[in-house]
Image (cartoon, rainbow, N blue to C red):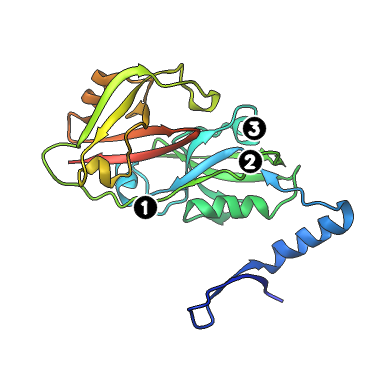
Amino acid sequence: MVGIATIIVGRGTGIGFAVPANMARRIGEQLLAKGKVDRAWIGVTVQDVTPDLARELNVPAGAGALINSVAPDSPGSRGNLKSGDVVITVNGKQLQQAHDLLREVLLYEPGRTVAMEVLRSGKRYATHATLASRNEPVPSLIPAQIETSSGKNFGLTIRDGPGGFSPSSRSSGSSCQVTAVIIGSPADRAGILAGDVVVEADGKVDPDTNSVQQATADGHAVLRMRRKEAFFYVALRK
């Protein structure tokens, strides 16, 4: 057996999706032993490294999973993972996209220690994390955005004001909020919406509008955004 079919595309010709056999076997063993499934959790949310983000972060496109938030007192936090890190391997297995990290974590039991290689500020370092049981929803993935840009400005209107507080944001709550996005602008194509909060601008935490303007003055910038409880990075370029 190679897998268990979970979804079949009715209009397709033999197109379906399946749970891999090794994962299905582990789930079956847990159900027999405990009567429930105990999933491993590392405590980070991730997104793909798009070409524009790769250029701004100085990492290869498709290099791995870009961390956009780390839960406090989580396995990832204790493993010294930080937002902006790109996880490139787990136990020696190369990652190419965000989902690869979540899939690899789910292959192990809680309590298992996994080794990781991480890119941070263009440098590679090794770390490890001891996985815990997941007692909250599966970390969300921010859909990758097509980030081609043109035009005279970024098409973004922001204002100073409290952006709320979340421990995983590394923010004191003083940020600036997006009030309007011009359709078809670089900000629109990067996936920014009115109501999003800018929590970092080119690495500066809790930026005000002046800080964001300074970060974008050279025609490009990396912004870390918060949308409700989710965090994600965008690369803007004129």
Residue at 56% x, 50% y is 101
Above-or-below relation of 199 to 152: above
Instruction: Decide: few, some or many residues near mark 3? Use Cα within 10 Å; few <14, some 14-19, many ≥20.
Output: some
The residue to which callout 2 is attached is 42
Q: Is residue 228 left or right of residue 112?
A: left
Direction right: furthest residue: 33
Front of the two marks 2 and 1: 2
Above-or-below relation of 143 to 192: below
Q: Quadrant of the C terminus?
A: top left
| Residue 172 locus on image (x, y percent) | 46, 16
Q: CA distance from mark 3 to mark 2?
A: 7 Å
Q: Is residue 14 visible?
A: yes
Do the numbered discs 3 and 2 sit on residues whose CB atoms are within 8 Å? Answer: yes
Label 3: which secondary element: loop
Q: Earlier in the sequence, mark 1 or mark 3?
A: 1
Question: Could you say which is closer to the camera, residue 52 or residue 158?
Answer: 158
Residue at 46% x, 21% y is 164
Instruction: Decide: few, some or many residues near mark 2? Use Cα within 10 Å; few <14, some 14-19, many ≥20.
Output: many
Quarter-wise, where is residue 19 in the image? bottom right
Q: Earlier in the sequence, mark 3 or mark 2?
A: 2
Name which residue type carries label 2.
Answer: Ile
Q: Earlier in the sequence, mark 2 or mark 1?
A: 2
Instruction: Decide: few, some or many residues near mark 1? Use Cα within 10 Å; few <14, some 14-19, many ≥20.
Output: some
Q: CA distance from mark 2 to mark 1?
A: 23 Å
- Numbered mark located on residue 74 in the image: 3
Residue at 28% x, 29% y is 179
| Residue 111 locus on image (x, y percent) | 76, 42
Name which residue type carries label 1.
Answer: Ala
Q: Is residue 203 visible?
A: no
Q: Quadrant of the N terminus?
A: bottom right
The residue to which callout 1 is attached is 61
Question: Could you say which is closer to the camera, residue 62 or residue 223?
Answer: 223
